[in-house]
Amino acid sequence: MAPTVSTTQFSDPAEVTEFVVNQGNGVKGLSETGIKALPDQYIQPFEERLINNFVNETDEAIPVIDMSYPDESKVAKAICDAAEKWGFFQVINHGVPLEVLDNVKAATHRFFNLPVEEKSKYTKENSLSTNVRFGTSFSPRAEKALEWKDYLSLFFVSETEASQFWPDVCKNEALDYMNKSKTMVRKLLEYLGKNLNVKELDETKESLFMGSIRVNLNYYPICPNPDLTVGVGRHSDVSSLTIVLQDQIDGLHVRSLVSGNWVHVPPVPGSFVINIGDTMQILSNGRYKSVEPRVLANGSNNRISVPIFVNPKPESVIGPLLEVIANGEEPIDRDVVYSDYVRYFFKKAHDGKKTVDFAKI
């Protein structure tokens, strides 16, 4: 049900912040008031508006890789090439049942359609678990301009913890989605690892590459002035890999490593978007590149996405793999504790790829 608050209530930015952030209505609630103009705190600087440095006029296109191709060596090579040249690609025929994808998308809509008093049970102030968080934008207290997005963040600790604390309307679907994706994730990491002279994904390497998992349910509501803001600002992820399930609504773009253009990532039914995170760039000593995605706001359609962030364990130390630098290759980055890296990422606004400077020698 749409909020019944009158839009005339918002006479200053503090009232918008109170309604959206503190009261837990999110931008979905703000959108549903029927506002006709974007509140000032969502207006991005001119240079950050994607519409002003818009998308490629070139023939650049994100690789789409069929994981069911009979020659596995060619699949592995295509994935590694894409990780080196693009840092971003899509996979189809990946082995995750389409029903699982449909179910988690439906569950995402169910959660965001809950009354605000139900969603607010999962805000930072109210959540019974620090691993479950309903929020808006990226880091409202650090951002000069807010992003037009709400999210539910679900950090996986155990099935028992998830069963107890994740919202009932989406926990089974989110867990099934996460669990059914693990075989594909492991296969991707095996391909990428072998290209780095990692012979097998043993317990130690598994802990380093995929020792922790976080699932986000993202909601991008209709925006009154989408050309003035962003759904998500340009950034790189701190993950090893990010696995993104899109719905059918356009919005995702990635900056080309070759041209610097913003390239549209079209929704491909049944596919996943895979992007290389900062951790994988650091572990590979720069062979694989993390890239800058961003998401447009939309003036006519609500949009959702469901990313899985595949990360090291928080206590892991990340740095160039010994297998990579054993031949005398000079390390680009120093060793850092992963939780320190993540803490640095979340204490500031999205700012392109500046987070990786934290690990530079």
Image (cartoon, grey):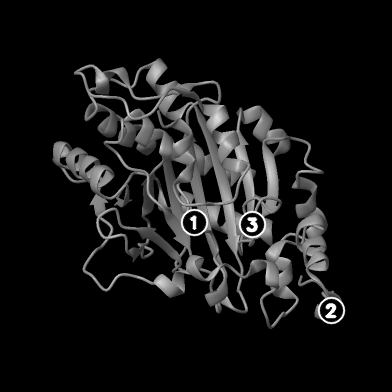
Q: Earlier in the sequence, mark 1 or mark 3?
A: 1
Q: Earlier in the sequence, mark 1 or mark 2?
A: 2
| Residue drawn at the location 55% of the way across and 26% of the way down | 314
Please give the residue where the numbered disc 1 appears in the rendered image.
102
| Residue drawn at the location 40% of the way across and 62% of the way down | 253
| Residue drawn at the location 62% of the way across and 52% of the way down | 138
Pick the front one: 267 or 96: 267
Mark 2 secondary-structure assignment = loop
Rendered-image quadrant of the C terminus: top left
Q: CA distance from mark 2 to mark 3?
A: 22 Å
Mark 1 secondary-structure assignment = helix
Please give the residue where the numbered disc 2 appears in the rendered image.
6
Please give the residue where the numbered disc 3 appears in the rendered image.
137
Q: Earlier in the sequence, mark 2 or mark 3?
A: 2
Find the residue positioned furthest to the front.
Answer: 361
Q: Position of residue 349 (x, y in %)?
A: 59, 51
Dots 1 and 3: beta carbons under 8 Å?
no
Q: Position of residue 31 (x, y in %)?
A: 69, 73
Q: Position of residue 126 (x, y in %)?
A: 82, 43
| Image-based side of 342 in relation to 332, left or right | right
